Image (tube, rainbow, N blue to C red):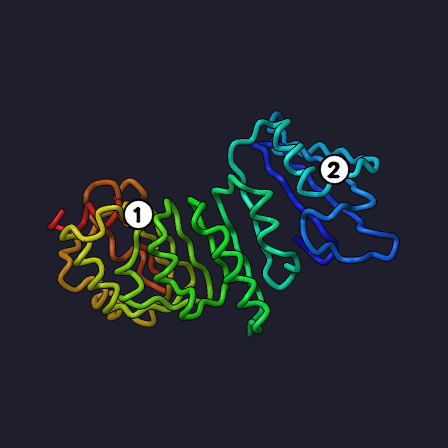
């Protein structure tokens, strides 16, 4: 949602965009249950026949005394949508979050973005409200730059019985955070990490801890080659002969040279093949 109110609904290769006007004086909508005076709707359909192209159609719906929430439900019923995805931009969210929850009862994937370099109290409170309302029902959660506090921490989210959890940019997890993971797949991107903590976590993982966790991806920075040795200490990692071919990672070996440099990546099925404990 943006300063000019918008909602995107994705149905496979078709996207429906709502834009609305609450009054002639451009009043803000307080909840998604408010009734606008004008709704502009456009659709974009992606076609792959001759490469990716988009067919766009725009039209205006007449005033029918429906709220935006009712329009969303109406469109979803046309497409027979069983699950919903929602994306929240924290610094632009002004609406009462519970009204969004009431109109997205089957929300399964939740994206929360906060791009402020120094989030203020409004940003923090809004992020916490969104997560508290939707987290118990979501299966996948993606957080970009979201400010986390003790009242709603990485550990609270990690214990939420999710299928997928992804963090980006701002949070620096610790070992205690990882020990609470109750997810099938976890991705932690562009973060700082204690290599000792990560090494300890992998040792525990290979010995049978975290049975639900099937995939872990971490993207961070290695300042020097010796950091790589610290990360792999005691893990019996092996080097592949061909570091440039993806197939080399599928032969129950691990390639240190391929990832050496400014970043490192770890995905569980690659690690499973390189640890002797597996």
Q: Position of residue 251 (x, y in %)?
A: 21, 41
Q: Quadrant of the rendered structure where residue 221 is?
A: bottom left
Question: With respect to residue 125, does 109 lie above or below?
Answer: above
Q: Mark on residue 247?
A: none
Give the image location of residue 84, x and y in percent.
54, 39
Residue occupying the point 65% across, 56% down? 95
Disc 2/disc 1 C-alpha distance (Å): 38 Å
Q: Residues within 10 Å of mark 1 (few under 14, many from 20)?
A: some
* Residue 154, above or below 268: below
Instruction: Indicate the position of residue 98 as horizontal and vertical percent values.
Output: 58, 52
Please state the horizontal and vertical placement of residue 125, each as a whole percent of the image. 54, 66
Which residue occupies the extreme right position in the image?
Answer: 24
Dot 2, how many residues are within 10 Å of its Cα: few (below 14), some (14-19), or many (20+)? some
144 on left or right of 154: right
Q: Choose top left, top right, bottom left or bottom right for residue 174.
A: bottom left
Residue marked by disc 2: 42
SS type, badge 2: strand
Q: Name the residue rendered at 56%, 31% in the picture.
A: 81
- Position of residue 129 relative to residue 193, above or below, is above
Mark 2 or mark 1: which comes first in sequence? 2
Q: Quadrant location of residue 75?
A: top right
Q: Secondary structure at mark 1?
A: strand
- In the picture of the structure, the residue carrying the numbered disc 1 is 215
68 with respect to 162 (left or right): right
Residue at image x 63%, y 35%?
A: 73
């Amino acid at each position: 949602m943006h300063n000019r109110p918008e909602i995107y609904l994705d149905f496979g290769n078709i996207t429906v965009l709502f834009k609305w006007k609450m009054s002639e004086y451009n009043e803000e909508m307080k909840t998604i249950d408010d009734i606008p005076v004008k709704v502009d709707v456009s659709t974009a359909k992606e076609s792959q026949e001759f490469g990716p192209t988009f067919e766009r159609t725009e039209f205006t719906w007449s005033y029918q005394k429906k709220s935006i929430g009712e329009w969303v439900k109406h469109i979803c019923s046309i497409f027979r949508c069983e699950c919903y995805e929602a994306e929240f931009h924290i610094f632009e969210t002004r609406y009462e979050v519970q009204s969004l929850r009431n109109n997205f009862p089957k929300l399964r994937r939740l994206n929360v973005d906060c791009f402020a370099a120094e989030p203020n109290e409004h940003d923090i409170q809004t992020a916490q409200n969104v997560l508290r309302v939707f987290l118990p029902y979501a299966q996948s959660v993606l957080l970009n730059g979201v400010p986390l506090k003790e009242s709603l921490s990485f550990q609270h989210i990690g214990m939420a019985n999710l299928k997928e959890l992804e963090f980006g940019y701002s949070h620096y997890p610790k070992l205690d955070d990882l020990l609470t993971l109750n997810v099938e797949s976890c991705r932690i991107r562009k973060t700082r990490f204690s290599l000792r903590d990560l090494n300890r976590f992998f040792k525990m993982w290979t010995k049978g801890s975290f049975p639900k966790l099937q995939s872990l991806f971490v993207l961070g920075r290695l300042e020097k080659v010796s950091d790589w040795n610290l990360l792999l200490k005691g893990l019996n990692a092996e080097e592949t002969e061909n570091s440039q071919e993806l197939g080399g990672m599928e032969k129950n070996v691990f390639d240190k040279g391929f990832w050496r440099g400014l970043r490192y990546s770890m995905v569980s099925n690659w690690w499973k093949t390189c640890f002797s404990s597996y």
